[in-house]
Amino acid sequence: MSEITRVALDAMGGDNAPREMVKGAVEAVQKRKDIKVLLTGKEDVIRKELSAYTYPKEQIEIVNATEVIETAEPPVMAIRRKKDSWNGAPFPITARPLS
């Protein structure tokens, strides 16, 4: 049995988010059976975008974060103020047991 690699992906970050991030996550799990993608961000927005695709559901998990750190925000202040964003702590997300 091969080991599963977990990849945390900020679905709300980058150009054309979340469309391009979700598309990339779906393409990755369609090509590889040994990864699980954790899409972080606003769950309702991510779920809506995922609904356009057919993919192995057990390989993509949504990690809800109700707050998004914007590009123009000073990083340290944003992480301290926005406790429900994943950006400040990606390692605890990937370290938790697989669901």
Image: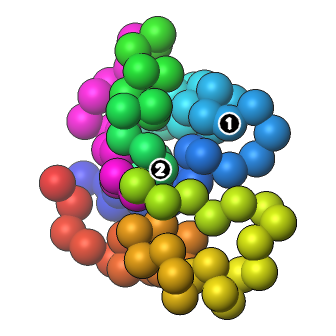
Residue at (65% x, 87% y) in the render = 77
Task: Tell me: 78 left or right of 93.
Answer: right
Residue at (56% x, 32% y) in the render = 22
Determine if residue 14 is in view. yes
| Residue underneath mark 2 | 41
Query: Do the CB atoms of the residues marked 1 and 2 lie less than 8 Å apart?
Result: yes
- Viewer-closest of 3 and 56: 56
Badge 1 element: loop
Residue at (76% x, 47% y) in the render = 14
* Image coords of residue 35 (percent x, y): 43, 48
Looking at the image, tell me whether mark 1 or mark 2 is earlier in sequence order: 1
The Cα atoms of the two marked residues, 1 and 2, are separated by 10 Å
Q: Which residues are magenta?
A: 54-65
* Image coords of residue 3 (percent x, y): 34, 60
Determine if residue 94 is in view. no
- Quadrant of the rendered image containing residue 27: top right
Residue type at mark 2: give it: Gly
| Residue underneath mark 1 | 17
